[in-house]
Image (cartoon, rainbow, N blue to C red):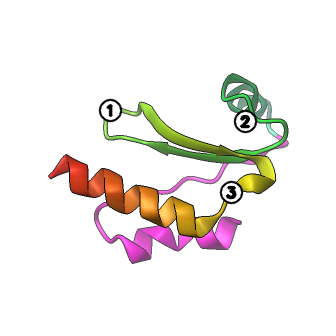
Amino acid sequence: MKTAVSGLEKEFPGQVKTENLNAREEESHKVIKEQGFATHGLLIRNAKDEVVWRQADHKVKMKQVRAEIRRLLKSAD
């Protein structure tokens, strides 16, 4: 997952910033629990750092992530 997520910055240059958290770190456990994930997941936040989309655990599909990013970027215009 890390490679696919990190690649989003290249796919959407200047529009997307990615961050990978280490699920073994205490602060990451807090995020996982707050977002309702069992083990891990993917969040999309807007420029105000508000969560605008989430997908939990092994349900993350990068095709859906890319579509949601495109939709959000289009609506921000």
**12 in magenta:** yes
Which of 43 and 60 lies nearest the eye of the viewer?
60
Residues at marks 3 and 2, CA–CA distance in whole angstroms: 18 Å
Labels 2, 1: front one: 1
By secondary structure, the bulk of the magenta-drawn segment is best described as loop
**Do the residues bearing badges 2 and 1 touch, measured as CB atoms within 8 Å?**
no
Q: Would residue 14 appear left or right of 17 to someone viewing this image? A: left
Magenta stretch? 1-24
Residue receiving disc 2: 28
Q: Which part of the image, by quadrant, shows the N terminus?
A: bottom right
Residue receiving disc 1: 48
Which of 28 and 53 lies nearest the eye of the viewer?
53
Labels 3, 1: front one: 3
Identify the residue shown where x is 80% and y is 38%: 25
Residue 33 image position (x, y, % from top left): 75, 26
Which of 68 and 44 lies nearest the eye of the viewer?
68
SS state under label 2: helix
Q: Which mark is residue 60?
A: 3
Q: Indicate the quadrant where residue 29 lies.
A: top right
SS state under label 1: loop
Residue 14 image position (x, y, % from top left): 28, 65
The extreme left residue here reads 77
Q: Would residue 57 appear left or right of 35 to someone viewing this image? A: right
